[in-house]
Image (tube, coloured by chain):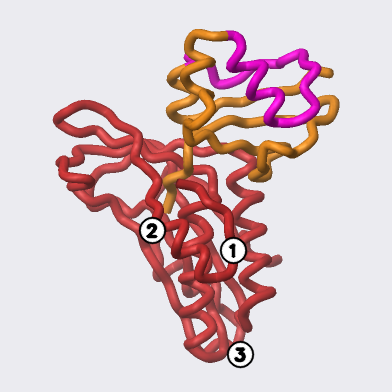
Chain colours: A red, B orange
Amino acid sequence: MSLARVSIQTNDFDLSQEVAALRAGDKRVGAVCSFVGTVRDRNDGSSVSSMELEHYPGMTEKAIEAMIDEAHRRFDILGARVIHRVGLLQPEDQIMMVAVVSAHRGQSFEACEFLMDYLKTQAPFWKKEQTPEGARWVDARVADDAALARWGISAPNA
Amino acid sequence: MKVQVRYFASVREALSSSGEAVETRAETLAALRDELIARGGAYATALARGKAVRMALDQAMSDEAAALSEGCEVAFFPPVTGG
């Protein structure tokens, strides 16, 4: 049975366990590259006491599956795993992770960054922060659109 | 035709609704957005032209020219901010 490539969940995750599962039994793997996003206690000049993550069930999974398919087309990678949490999170909490395995490091570094740039601008998640000034929806960043454009994909979000 | 419309994040809050079935003559996402804006009130504000509203058709990001079909699922939401 192949492992799930995408999980949307409220509970936390363990990167080590996920990487171990991703490369288990595959002797071709010589490189693992991963990224973990975490909740900061400051954003746009305000302190952040908590964050609520909303998503579009169904579309989220489809969108990320499509991103992983695209990463396989573009890069010589052997596998990828994305976990994204939803619900209420606190500063220091893990928000999401991407892990990619390949034979050599170059392809997994690139694929990991590609998946992050894609996810930041095209996966239907929304963050709402609690600050001393009240709750506010996080604004999308133009810089994230520019990051995606580097890969030749023009799909402005912000 | 009848389409299922869904709202997320700040759009959902502004409309106090996570979605509704809409009977429409609109043939495209753009025309449906205009119909909803024409309701006035919160709809006119939340979906206003010039406002950053992203759309999905049958759970895929779509531009406004996308054609609607009977029973399709449409979503309106602000720019995404995951990761």
Upstream in the sequence, badge 3 or badge 2? 3
Q: CA distance from mark 3 to mark 1?
A: 30 Å
Report the magenta residues as a range.
B15-39
Indicate which disc residue A9 carries.
none
Q: Quadrant of the N terminus of chain A?
A: bottom right
Name the residue tied to disc 3.
Answer: A28
> Residue B72 or A36: which is nearer the viewer?
B72
Q: Could you say where residue B34 lies in the image, as x and y percent from the top left?
A: 64, 21
On the picture, is B27 further left or further right than B13? Answer: right
User: Chain under label 1?
Assistant: A
Confirm whether circles 3 and 2 share one chain.
yes
Q: CA distance from mark 3 to mark 2?
A: 35 Å
Name the residue tied to disc 2.
Answer: A143
Q: Count residues near mark 2 (Cα–Cα under 10 Å), then give few for <14, some for 14-19, many for 20+.
A: few
Q: Amino acid at mark 2?
A: Ala
Q: Could you say where residue A127 lies in the image, as x and y percent from the top left?
A: 38, 40
User: Chain under label 2?
Assistant: A
Q: Amino acid at mark 1?
A: Ile
Name the residue tied to disc 1.
Answer: A153
> Residue B33 or B50: which is nearer the viewer?
B50
